[in-house]
Image: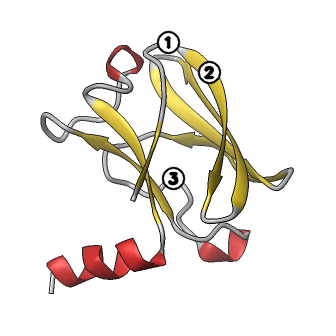
Amino acid sequence: MQQIVLQSVPSQQTQVVLDGQSCSISVYVKNQCMFLDLAVNGTQIAYAVQCKNLVSLVPTSYLGFSGWMVFFDTQGTNDPVYTGLGTRWVLLYLDSADLEVFNGIGS
């Protein structure tokens, strides 16, 4: 599991390598909701995905992204708000090994 560092600002972009994938991530607020865009190796994979607590931001593997990216509320179960990014709400990347452990917890 890898935490993607975000600042508590309403609009930002970051570059990170996740499991060998060169990722460009944009997080921004529109109409009081937070959204995420993701490009992998220069190809847009996800666009204007609404950010929810523990909901996969890239729900299908056929889009060319391996792993799972989610926001996690460290103090409850609320959806993320930009003022708490990096502290209360963290953006996490889980690779295939992390997913096996995660799926095994519920079994």
Check disc 1 and give the amino acid type: Val
- Estimate the spatial distance between the alpha carbons at disc 3 and disc 2, rounded to whole Å: 17 Å
Q: Mark 2 points at which residue?
A: 12
| Numbered tag placed on residue 9 in the rendering | 1
Q: Residue at x 43, y 15 (%)?
A: 8
Q: Does 77 sit above or below residue 32? A: below
Residue 87, by quadrant, is top left
Between disc 3 and disc 2, whose residue precedes? 2
Q: How far apart are marks 2 and 1 (CA)?
A: 7 Å
Viewer-nearest of discs 1 and 3: 1
Q: Mark 3 points at which residue?
A: 57
102 displayed left or right of 29: left
Secondary structure type for disc 3: loop
Foreground of the two, 94 or 50? 94
* Residue 74, percent from left and from top: 19, 38
Amino acid carrying label 2: it is Gln
Circles 2 and 1: CB atoms closer than 8 Å: yes
Q: Which amino acid does label 3 sit on?
A: Leu
Q: Residue 34 or 40: which is nearer the viewer? A: 40
Crowding at dot 2, Cα within 10 Å, few <14 / some 14-19 / many 20+, comes out as some
Q: Position of residue 86 (x, y in %)?
A: 37, 27
Image quadrant in which the C terminus is located: bottom left
